[in-house]
Image (tube, rainbow, N blue to C red):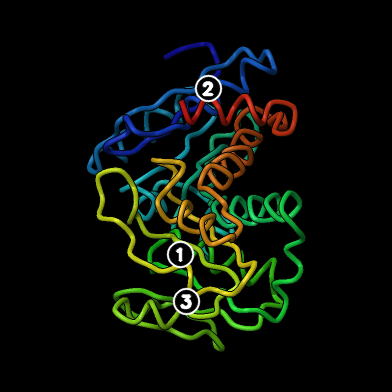
């Protein structure tokens, strides 16, 4: 055990995670005497991991990445509302400083909302999406988080369309669903397109869609952040559309966890460009 406070990100594999870069950057900027690191934890080792960390007073919590997000609930004492709605946990923290009990939360929905709002403030107000058509590609945990964000922050949307290989179980009462083979028709005239699939990520197949079928002035958001500038975003810009990369959601959800772990607000605005340059390098 260590006497220096620390938080972690766990998953398997874990080497790809950018969380240590983000949290380490903020810890340095705020001169906080604490650490943040990545730890590979196999799926069958989650129970032993939390047993050991609960007993370590220096441990402040952990972020959770794949494939553990749906396996964490039995090991925490409280599952927060967002995590229940999304059916996944991406952050575990003590319910209070020094407290033994652990809370499981999910900041993906709030992180996505903040990233989209940020893009709206830079490239034009997001408010004109009222009454417009949003299309969400994917049916997994990330898609569930985005759907929650759309319902919570953009209630005035005219229509939400989900496109996935299997009909998702989180369709809203007025949502429409298209099978993956019909995605071209689904995005026709869309005002907002969000890719929550891993397609286009390094090591995965490309995402085959035609942004030229979207409405003029539409916004395209790709949650993929490796690479940051995905083919989807390049295509969107080529058609004169606004493009939102995956770093925004990643950074904003990390900031929410940072506050839970270290008790201070992440310096988002002061060092935004420097942090993005670090993550893109």
Label 1: how many Cα within 10 Å (few below 14, some 14–19, many 20+): many
Q: Which residue is mark 2?
A: 57
Q: Residue at x 59, y 61 (%)?
A: 241
Q: Quadrant of the N terminus?
A: top left
Q: Using the image, determine if residue 263 lies above or below residue 81.
A: above
**Distance between the Cα atoms at labels 3 and 2?**
50 Å
- Residue 187, label in figure: 3
- Give the SS element for disc 2: loop
- On the image, the x and y values in percent for residue 136 come to 48, 70
Between circles 3 and 2, the one closer to the viewer is: 3
- Front-most of 88 and 270? 270
- On the image, the x and y values in percent for residue 151 come to 63, 72
Q: In the visual, does 76 lie left or right of 45?
A: right
- Give the SS element for disc 3: loop
- On the image, the x and y values in percent for residue 51 come to 37, 33
Query: Which residue ends up furthest to the bottom in the rendered image?
Result: 174
Q: Residue at x 50, y 49 (%)?
A: 77
Label 3: how many Cα within 10 Å (few below 14, some 14–19, many 20+): many
**Distance between the Cα atoms at labels 3 and 1?**
16 Å
- Front-most of 199 and 43? 199
Between circles 1 and 2, the one closer to the viewer is: 1
Query: Are the residues tagged 3 and 2 within 8 Å (C-beta)?
Result: no
Q: Using the image, determine if residue 275 lies above or below residue 138.
A: above
Mark 1 or mark 2, which has the lower sequence index?
2
Mark 3 or mark 1, which has the lower sequence index?
1
Mark 3 or mark 2, which has the lower sequence index?
2
Q: Which residue is mark 1?
A: 143
Between circles 3 and 1, the one closer to the viewer is: 3
- Give the SS element for disc 1: helix
Q: Residue at x 24, y 38 (%)?
A: 42
């Amino acid at each position: 055990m260590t006497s220096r406070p620390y938080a972690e990100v766990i998953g398997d594999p874990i080497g790809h995670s950018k969380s240590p870069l983000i949290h380490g950057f903020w810890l340095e900027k705020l001169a906080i005497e604490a650490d943040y690191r990545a730890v590979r934890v196999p799926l069958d080792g989650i129970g032993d991991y939390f047993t050991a960390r609960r007993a370590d007073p220096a441990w402040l919590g952990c972020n959770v990445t794949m494939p553990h997000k749906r396996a964490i609930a039995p090991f925490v004492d409280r599952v927060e509302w967002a995590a229940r709605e999304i059916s996944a946990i991406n952050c575990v923290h003590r319910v209070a400083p020094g407290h033994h009990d652990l809370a499981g939360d999910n900041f993906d929905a709030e992180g996505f909302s903040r990233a989209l709002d940020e893009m709206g403030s830079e490239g034009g107000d997001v408010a004109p999406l009222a009454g417009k058509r949003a299309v969400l590609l994917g049916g997994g945990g990330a898609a569930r988080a985005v759907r929650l964000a759309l319902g919570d922050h953009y209630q005035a949307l005219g229509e939400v369309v989900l496109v996935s290989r299997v009909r998702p179980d989180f369709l809203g009462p007025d949502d429409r669903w298209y099978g993956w083979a019909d995605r071209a028709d689904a995005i026709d005239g869309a005002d907002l397109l969000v890719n929550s699939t891993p397609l286009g990520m390094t090591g995965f197949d490309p995402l085959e869609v035609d942004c030229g079928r979207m409405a003029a002035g539409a916004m395209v958001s790709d949650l993929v952040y490796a690479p940051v500038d995905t083919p989807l975003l390049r295509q969107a810009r080529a058609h004169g559309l606004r493009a939102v990369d995956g770093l925004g959601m990643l950074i904003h959800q990390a900031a929410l966890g940072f506050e839970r772990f270290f008790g201070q607000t992440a310096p988002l605005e002061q060092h935004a460009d420097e942090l993005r340059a670090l993550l893109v390098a």
